[in-house]
Image (cartoon, rainbow, N blue to C red):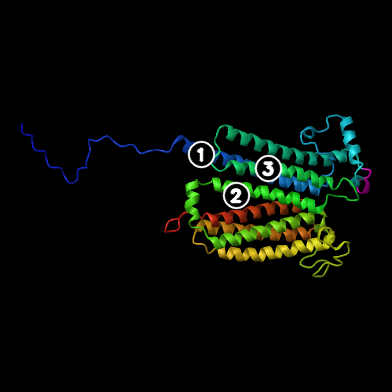
């Protein structure tokens, strides 16, 4: 039987319109889980970031109020409970009376005055315990739920390890002021303690930046990285870190209150009698004039080099990268002005604390500009991101 001729197809007719639609593969459950985990882990790290920032501020207040030696023992677990009775308070006060700070500086202090400095140090340590607890609960929660993205387990464990090391270094710092003839903790140990706090803060900030984009976006952005600008901003970050350490040395010996004129020091360029302590190397940590001079000079170098890096960053073809370097420069100008005002006023508590918080802001701003150099955001031909 002859078949009927088929009708001609229109050239506009789609081929295979009667075929079953082909489904497009979607991301699997693992990909979905990783996408959700990135957002959740980023939020958790932001909480830790805020708490570490608060920890740095509270640590600064603890130093400025001379409270750091009020608790003379290191009890990571049982020390979480403060004195709960008059007898316990009397015991803690007696322990404090045995250290040089009380004998040489605070002899005759009342119990109420002791309580004031005790609560500052207790709060500082308690905040450290809380940060550790938030880290542990978050990490275990994401690990048990298997929500940690590939390659991130070691990074998150590294943050926890640094936190544990920070606790040990904190006690190493405090122990330096419990014997001998010191009125305060060793300045170089204080600088180590503060420096590690900034290292922790820096790693958390970098991880937060990374988690703000998908792995695919980061890989794509890295192809357009500005290697030269990344190198310059890395050098600037290291220089800022050095300046932070020098600032800790200044705070450790109250060097900011020794010379309150600027740009001179005691009416001259170089501070008077800067090498009076023996052996010679101790002057670079303990002579108030020399330590403040080093901090000032490093600040000038940081400012000049920062302007150079900014001049290169503002020429970037990527608008978001330009903006990050502009923000960095604005914070740098404010920090320099705040530092000068702090010196001219003899480093009062509120200005000293503001200057320390400004250091945090500048450090993070430099790190963000560095990140934007490494992972520039995609933008259209018109320049819109």
Q: Earlier in the sequence, mark 2 or mark 3?
A: 3
Q: Position of residue 181 (x, y in %)?
A: 91, 50
Q: Residue furthest front?
A: 1
**Mark identifier at residue 206:** 2
Q: CA distance from mark 2 to mark 3?
A: 17 Å
Name the mark nearer the viewer: 3 or 1. Answer: 3
Q: In this rendering, would 37 be left or right of 282?
A: left
Q: CA distance from mark 3 to mark 1?
A: 24 Å
Does the rendering let one see residue 264?
yes
Instruction: Please give the name of the residue rendered at 84% of the width and 59% of the height, measured from the top-left corner.
Output: 282
Q: Which residues are magenta?
A: 103-108
**Mark identifier at residue 156:** none
Q: Earlier in the sequence, mark 3 or mark 1?
A: 1
Q: Looking at the picture, tell me which residue is in the foreground, 212 or 115.
A: 212
Residue 339 on the magenta span: no
Question: Which residue matches tag 3?
Answer: 161
Q: In this rendering, would 74 be left or right of 384?
A: right
Q: Looking at the picture, tell me which residue is in the foreground, 347 or 367.
A: 367
Instruction: Please give the name of the residue rendered at 81% of the width and 58% of the height, measured from the top-left corner.
Output: 285
Q: Looking at the image, is 265 positioned above or below residue 77?
A: below
Residue 105 on the magenta span: yes
Q: Position of residue 358 (x, y in %)?
A: 68, 54
Question: Which residue matches tag 1?
Answer: 34
Q: Quadrant of the N terminus?
A: top left
């Amino acid at each position: 039987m002859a078949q009927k001729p088929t009708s001609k197809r229109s050239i506009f007719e789609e081929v295979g319109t009667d075929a079953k639609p082909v489904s497009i593969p979607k991301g699997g459950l693992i990909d979905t889980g990783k996408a959700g985990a990135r957002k959740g882990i980023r939020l958790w790290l932001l909480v830790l970031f805020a708490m570490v920032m608060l920890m740095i501020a509270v640590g600064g207040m603890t130093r400025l109020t001379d409270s750091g030696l009020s608790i003379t023992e290191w009890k990571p677990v049982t020390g979480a409970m403060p004195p709960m009775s008059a007898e316990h308070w009397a015991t803690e006060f007696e322990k404090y009376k045995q250290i040089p700070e009380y004998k040489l500086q605070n002899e005759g202090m009342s119990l109420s005055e002791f309580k004031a400095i005790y609560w500052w140090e207790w709060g500082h340590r308690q905040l450290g315990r809380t940060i550790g607890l938030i880290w542990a609960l978050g990490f275990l929660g994401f690990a048990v739920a298997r929500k940690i993205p590939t390659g991130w387990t070691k990074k998150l464990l590294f943050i926890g390890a640094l936190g544990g090391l920070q606790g040990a270094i904190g006690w190493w710092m405090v122990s330096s002021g419990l014997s001998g003839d010191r009125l305060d903790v060793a300045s170089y140990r204080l600088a180590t303690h503060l420096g590690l706090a900034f290292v922790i803060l820096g790693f958390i900030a970098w991880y937060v930046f990374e988690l703000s984009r998908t792995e695919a976006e980061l890989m794509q952005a890295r192809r357009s990285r500005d290697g030269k600008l990344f190198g310059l901003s890395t050098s600037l970050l290291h220089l800022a870190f050095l300046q932070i350490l020098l600032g800790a040395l200044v705070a450790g010996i109250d060097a900011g209150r020794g010379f309150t004129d600027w740009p001179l020091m005691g009416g001259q360029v170089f501070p008077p009698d800067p090498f009076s302590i023996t052996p010679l190397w101790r002057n670079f940590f303990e002579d108030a004039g020399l330590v403040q001079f080093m901090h000032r000079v490093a600040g000038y170098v940081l400012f000049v080099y920062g302007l150079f890096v900014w001049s290169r960053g503002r020429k970037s073809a990527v608008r978001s990268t330009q903006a990050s370097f502009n923000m960095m420069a604005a914070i740098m100008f404010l920090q320099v002005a705040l530092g000068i005002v702090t010196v001219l006023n003899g480093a009062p508590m509120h200005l000293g604390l503001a200057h320390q918080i400004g250091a945090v802001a500048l450090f993070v701003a430099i790190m963000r500009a560095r990140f934007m150099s490494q992972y520039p955001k995609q933008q259209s031909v018109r320049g819109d991101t």
